[in-house]
Image: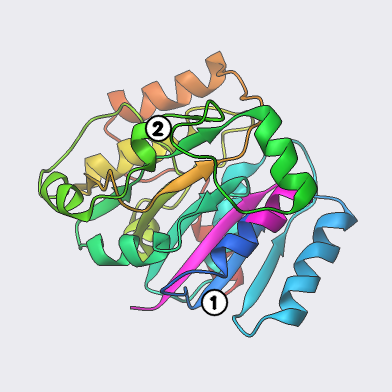
């Protein structure tokens, strides 16, 4: 199954470099990597070009002008540049276990999307990893790793957990997320009405639920390690957009993927 790995980024090339290094060490490689860049400066473009020049796997730099927080548009633009059947989404500060892509593909199933988990690396250890360009993850016994249970890989348990249909809203994050491209097209992708951080992931999933696409958890597989950064805060406007999708049982958003698909047809 042809697969695109879509990596979001914004002006953090030192973290993106480690993420790309981990993406290029996969036991099962994606068919292409697309960097969904929300307007980063030249250092990010130079880094991506270096990876393009040194690696055989196709790497696409999908860039848009910096006009504030436009993560949804950045993702939609990247999706429009993919022709692959299956899409795996991560953030540009998420280091990947070597079987990350393999695990997502193993559990891909029509009528569902996949939600994975993450462990968190402390600020001090993150800084050391970036300084030394080191991919070695902190030990589970170390104070430098939290959410330690998410760092255990146990495929047998994953197989059992993944059998259950799940419609929970809690813990929705597209930093470790995969879906069939056609299912994303059906709901018109990410909602570009979101202009600030927060709830854009939940609103997308709400529309997927309304379409009949359910959640499959793959805890203990597709391991991911989050390089430290301060998280943003939700705001009232985003909550209103989410509430509207819930109350009206929306399937498609008006301001979404379709306009990019028509340009890149």
Whole-number angstrom distance, CA of label 1 to CA of label 2:
44 Å
Most extreme residue toward the right is 42
Magenta segment: does it hold 15? yes
Q: On the rendered image, what quadrant is the C terminus found in?
A: bottom right
Residue tagged by mark 2?
Answer: 148
Specify the segment rendered in magenta: 1-18
Q: Quadrant of residue 58?
A: bottom right
Residue tagged by mark 1?
Answer: 265
Q: Residues within 10 Å of mark 2 (few under 14, many from 20)?
A: some
| Image height of 100 relative to 10, above or below | below
**How is this picture coloured?**
rainbow
Decide if residue 88 is on the left or right side of residue 137. left
**Of tags 1 and 2, which is closer to the observer?**
2
Q: Quadrant of residue 117?
A: top left
* Residue placed most toward the observer, 174 or 20: 20
**SS at mark 2 in the image:** helix
Magenta segment: does it hold 255? no
Q: Residue at the location (80% across, 50% down)?
A: 40
Decide if residue 1 is on the left or right side of residue 128. left
């Amino acid at each position: 199954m042809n697969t695109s790995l879509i990596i979001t980024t914004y002006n953090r090339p030192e973290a993106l470099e480690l993420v790309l290094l981990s993406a290029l060490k996969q036991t099962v490689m994606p068919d292409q990597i697309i960097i969904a860049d929300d307007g980063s400066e030249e250092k990010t473009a130079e880094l991506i070009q270096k990876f393009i020049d040194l690696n055989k796997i196709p790497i696409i730099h999908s860039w848009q002008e910096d006009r504030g927080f436009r993560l949804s548009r950045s993702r939609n633009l990247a999706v429009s540049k993919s022709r692959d059947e299956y899409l795996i989404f991560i953030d540009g500060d998420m280091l990947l276990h070597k079987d990350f892509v393999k695990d997502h593909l193993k559990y891909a199933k029509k009528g569902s999307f996949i939600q994975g988990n993450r462990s968190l690396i402390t600020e001090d250890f993150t800084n050391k990893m970036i300084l030394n360009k080191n991919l070695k993850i902190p030990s589970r016994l170390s104070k430098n790793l939290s959410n330690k249970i998410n760092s255990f890989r146990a495929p047998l348990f994953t197989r059992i957990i993944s059998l259950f249909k799940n419609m929970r809203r809690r813990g929705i994050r597209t930093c470790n997320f995969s879906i069939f491209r056609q299912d994303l097209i059906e709901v018109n992708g990410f909602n570009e009405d979101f202009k600030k951080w927060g709830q854009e992931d939940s609103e997308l999933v709400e529309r997927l639920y309304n379409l009949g696409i359910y959640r499959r958890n793959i805890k203990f597989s597709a391991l991911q390690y989050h390089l430290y950064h301060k998280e943003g805060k939700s705001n009232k406007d985003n909550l209103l957009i989410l509430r509207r999708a819930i109350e009206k049982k929306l399937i498609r958003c008006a301001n979404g993927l379709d306009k990019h698909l028509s340009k890149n047809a």
